[in-house]
Image (tube, rainbow, N blue to C red):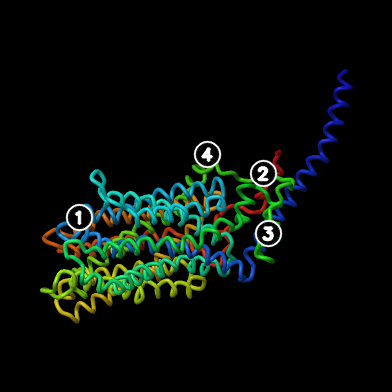
Amino acid sequence: MATTSYAHDKVSSHSSEPQLEKTHDAAYELDERRRAALAEIDDATFSWFHVKVSMVAGVGFFTDAYDIFAINIASTMLGYLYTKSGKLNTNQDLGVKVATPIGNLFGQLIFGWLADVVGRKRMYGIELMIIIVATFGQAVAGEARGVNILAVIITWRFIMGVGIGGDYPLSAVISSEFAATKSRGRLMTAVFANQGWGQFAAALVAFILVAAFKDSILHDNPTELRHVDFIWRLLIGLGCVPGAVALYFRLTIPETPRFTMDVERNVVQAAQDVDNFLTTGTYHVDPDAVIQRVQAPKATKRDFIKYFSKWENAKLLIGTSYSWFALDIAFYGLGLNSSIILQTIGFGSPSAGLPKTESVYVNLKNICVGNMILSAAGLIPGYWATFLFIDSWGRKPIQLMGFIMLTILFVIMGFGYDKLTATKSGTNAFVFLYCLADFFQNFGPNTTTFIIPGEAFPTRYRSTGHGISAATGKLGAVVAQVGFSRLENIGGPDKFVQHLLEIFAFFMLTGIGSTLLLPETKQKSLEDISGEKQEGFIQGVATV
């Protein structure tokens, strides 16, 4: 009996060896196929497909910036229309401006997590639908006895903010995962640079509308200003147009091969996708194809904690998150309040003694012109300076340089505020410094804080990591807006603005420290940046 059992065990042992060898060979072959597909993406020449990805993602950022910063001009119009004083009070101004950043925070966390769970493709487009619906909702907002129009606008702006927030991790991760290593920084910068054009477009559209309605405004009843109501609704509502144009292309963009390989664990389909989109710019999924799943690191709560409990990974998340937080304190503190700052320093303010309707027209026109100058002179050139140097200088040097320059500029603007704004030439110098600050925000941390989180984490946590970093940044935007609203009038109307600029300088200084926690990511593959061992990444073939 014992002899029989021994013989049986020996036969079983010998029969299992070929099976184990076969499984090992299959895992090795799939691992090699994965690395070959990744190398093909990383070494790809720039093609029409990359242009398409940049345009589809970029139009979303154009829409985001337009919708966020149009309120900077529209809030002045709302003050004329819906308050007796002709100006929104502190809480009203805070509500319409802070609702969107709060929505952003939730959208970035939720969409960032979902894109790692269900896929980039399945979520891409949903955020744009939310933006379109909420933007249209603002434009047709009404008032009744039991409904305050500002409360309705604030609600819609929060919902719009959720959609805009979702765009950040999705667009960043999709553009980074499709990009070749040598041009990844420029592709992601080109996507994000549309933010500058969106801000400029909001000011330009407002200027065109104000000019078009000039005669109507001048002949309006000063107590009603009926045509100003038309202008703000058109200004906000036109934000739907670019989003509606981009929606189809977002819904039809392919899933990134990295997600298909590393999260869905379908290496064969991912390799086919790479061949298709690099050669024809299209992709095809055969619903009847046999799916072969592989064994690879899987996103779980335990794995997430294990990964980010390592200091080298935790400090990366801390560095990307706090850098974005510090930057957004100043970026949104200035960006959402540039009209207030322009009026405070007397740039383009209407002359005293003008009839009310003419004063309204002149003030709105000057606010639009001022915002166009700030966008064209500082914001837009800053993005494209980054585009030129991001893949040669690297992300970290540009971010460090930006924070250092911003610290210096805000110190000058804050501590020299009284002397700078005492004369007309000084005021012009202040506007020049303001434009320089806008320039170094974008040729600096505003762009790099978007790029680095889209590169630094492994595929299974890339969107989540970007979402956490971006949401921390929007927490900074909320802090900045609440702080600006509560502090600006200490000591008299707009008397505390100079001290706010000094506070911004402090946060820019702290951003230098958080930048030192970050690695340089230029000219490295996403897998090398993640720090995870790639040889043997696939451990076997999973049983389906």
- The span from disc 3 to disc 1 (Cα, nearest Å) is 55 Å
Q: Is residue 446 above or below residue 83?
A: below
Q: Which residue carries the number 3 mark?
A: 37
Q: Nearer the viewer, residue 129 or 48?
A: 129
Q: How many marks?
A: 4
- Helix, strand or loop at label 3? It is helix
Q: Looking at the rendering, in which quadrant would you find the C terminus? A: top right
Q: Nearer the viewer, residue 103 or 364?
A: 364
Q: Which residue does the image show at 22% across and 62% down from the upper left? A: 500
Horizontally, residue 278 falls left or right of residue 225, namely right
Disc number for residue 90: 1
Q: Say what amino acid the circle numbered 2 marks.
A: Gln
Q: Are marks 2 and 1 in contact (CB under 8 Å)?
A: no
Q: Which residue carries the number 2 mark?
A: 295
- The span from disc 1 to disc 4 (Cα, nearest Å) is 45 Å
Q: Position of residue 110 (x, y in %)?
A: 45, 47
Q: Which residue carries the number 4 mark?
A: 302
Q: Is residue 146 above or below residue 378?
A: above
Q: Nearer the viewer, residue 263 or 275?
A: 275
- Helix, strand or loop at label 1? It is helix
Pick whichever of labels 1 and 4 is earlier in the sequence.
Answer: 1
